[in-house]
Image: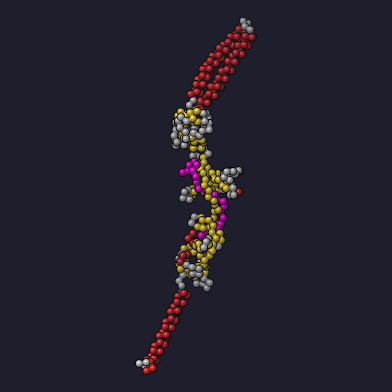
């Protein structure tokens, strides 16, 4: 049987196809209207917003400083010889003049004993000369002696007294020399490292140890010559601990007039008013504060980096009112201060910065303060 033999079936199929086509178009139109309605009513995203304000910003440079003591001294002998005894150990606290070690002085002590014997003889000569001078004066007065004998006795007395004074000077020098063989602390403080041992031969250039009073401490800063023109007395310096937290606030008290030819740096010093926890020759972080000027800072979390460029979002009024809109802004940033960037350009005071939720929004997205 063919279609020509059943015209009613053919007409029925045409009507069914038309009905299906009309139904599909109606359904598609209804779906499109719903999507358009959804875009127009996009809800505002809740974000954290702060108003930018200019604040004082420090222009700083960090250096590695060295702690030095104005009352720190290297101990060197003033004589040569072999060390016979070391009386202290590293870390001992000693008073000024305390004996630190002994150098063999037997030869000098023998010379001293010999001079003391000579002095005894010279004292006898002086005593005898005085008696002879007195006797000659009495004989002259009695007319039993000559003037020549009196003068001769007086001159012999003067010669004996001069010889005694010479021996006394030699004794004084010998005792002073022997004292150098007992090395004494030049100042009160703590004994440092002792690189020598008993039995070592030392010279006047040998460093025996050091005495550190740990008082009168200073910070030594070596500043490159490029930055040296900015150095001046009274410039603030902040000392930092190992975590970067401030532990002392000082000022520059000395700027060297010359440049170190080896390092091409200029020496600057600061006093230390609170030396607690600091030791001689210790390294510390020192932050020189060159100036303090008003500027803007923004949190690290408010910044995005795209293809090497930094961006931040600001919240601005929507063109037709009715809320806020996020706009992406290219910014130029300076150094990090704490948890903030210093803003060089791209933002200004009074603008509303989005500091949290920037990952959930895009340029032109409606936002609201949460």
Q: Residue at x 53, y 15 (%)?
A: 121
Which one is in front, 82 or 336?
82
Assess whether residue 177 is covered by the magenta stretch: no
Residues drawn in magenta: 274-299
Task: Report the label total.
Answer: 0
* Quarter occupied by the N terminus: bottom left
What is the residue that sits farthest to the left in this orientation? 1
- Residue 117 lies, in percent from the top left, at 51, 17
Q: Main secondary structure of the magenta part?
A: strand
Q: Residue at x 54, y 52 (%)?
A: 60
Which one is in front, 143 or 257?
257
What is the residue that sits farthest to the top in this orientation? 144
Q: Residue at x 53, y 60 (%)?
A: 53
Q: Is residue 200 visible?
A: yes
Q: Residue at x 53, y 48 (%)?
A: 63
- Residue 174 lies, in percent from the top left, at 53, 23
Which one is in front, 85 or 321?
85
């Amino acid at each position: 049987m063919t279609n020509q033999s059943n015209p009613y079936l053919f007409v029925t199929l045409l009507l069914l196809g038309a009905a299906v086509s009309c139904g599909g178009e109606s359904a598609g139109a209804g779906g499109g209207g719903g999507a358009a309605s959804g875009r127009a009513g996009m809800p505002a995203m809740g974000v954290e917003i702060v108003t930018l304000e200019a604040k004082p910003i420090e222009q700083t440079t960090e250096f590695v400083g060295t702690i030095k003591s104005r009352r720190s001294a290297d101990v060197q002998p003033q004589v040569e010889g072999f060390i016979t005894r070391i009386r202290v150990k590293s870390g001992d606290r000693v008073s000024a003049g305390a004996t630190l070690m002994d150098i063999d002085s037997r030869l000098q002590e023998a010379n001293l004993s010999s001079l003391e014997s000579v002095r005894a003889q010279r004292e006898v000569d002086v005593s005898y000369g005085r008696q002879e001078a007195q006797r000659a004066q009495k004989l002259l007065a009695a007319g039993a002696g000559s003037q020549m004998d009196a003068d001769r006795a007086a001159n012999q007395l003067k010669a004996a007294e001069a010889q005694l004074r010479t021996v006394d000077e030699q004794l004084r020098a010998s005792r002073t020399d022997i004292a150098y063989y007992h090395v004494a602390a030049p100042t009160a403080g703590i004994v440092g490292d002792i690189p020598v041992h008993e039995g070592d031969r030392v010279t006047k250039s040998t460093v025996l140890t050091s005495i550190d009073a740990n008082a009168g401490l200073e910070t030594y800063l070596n500043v490159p010559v490029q930055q040296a023109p900015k150095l001046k007395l009274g410039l603030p310096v902040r000392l930092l601990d190992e975590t970067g937290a401030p532990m002392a606030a000082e000022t520059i008290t000395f700027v060297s007039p010359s440049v170190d030819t080896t390092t091409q740096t200029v020496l600057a010093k600061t006093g230390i008013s609170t030396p607690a926890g600091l030791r001689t020759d210790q390294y510390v972080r020192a932050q020189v504060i060159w100036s303090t000027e008003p500027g803007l800072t923004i949190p690290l979390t408010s910044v995005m980096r795209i293809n090497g460029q930094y961006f931040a979002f600001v919240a601005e009024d929507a063109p037709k009112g009715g809320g806020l809109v996020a706009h992406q802004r290219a910014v130029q940033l300076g150094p990090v201060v704490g948890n903030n960037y210093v803003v060089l350009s791209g933002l200004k005071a009074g603008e509303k910065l989005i500091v949290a939720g920037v990952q959930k929004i895009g340029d032109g997205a409606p936002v609201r303060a949460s």
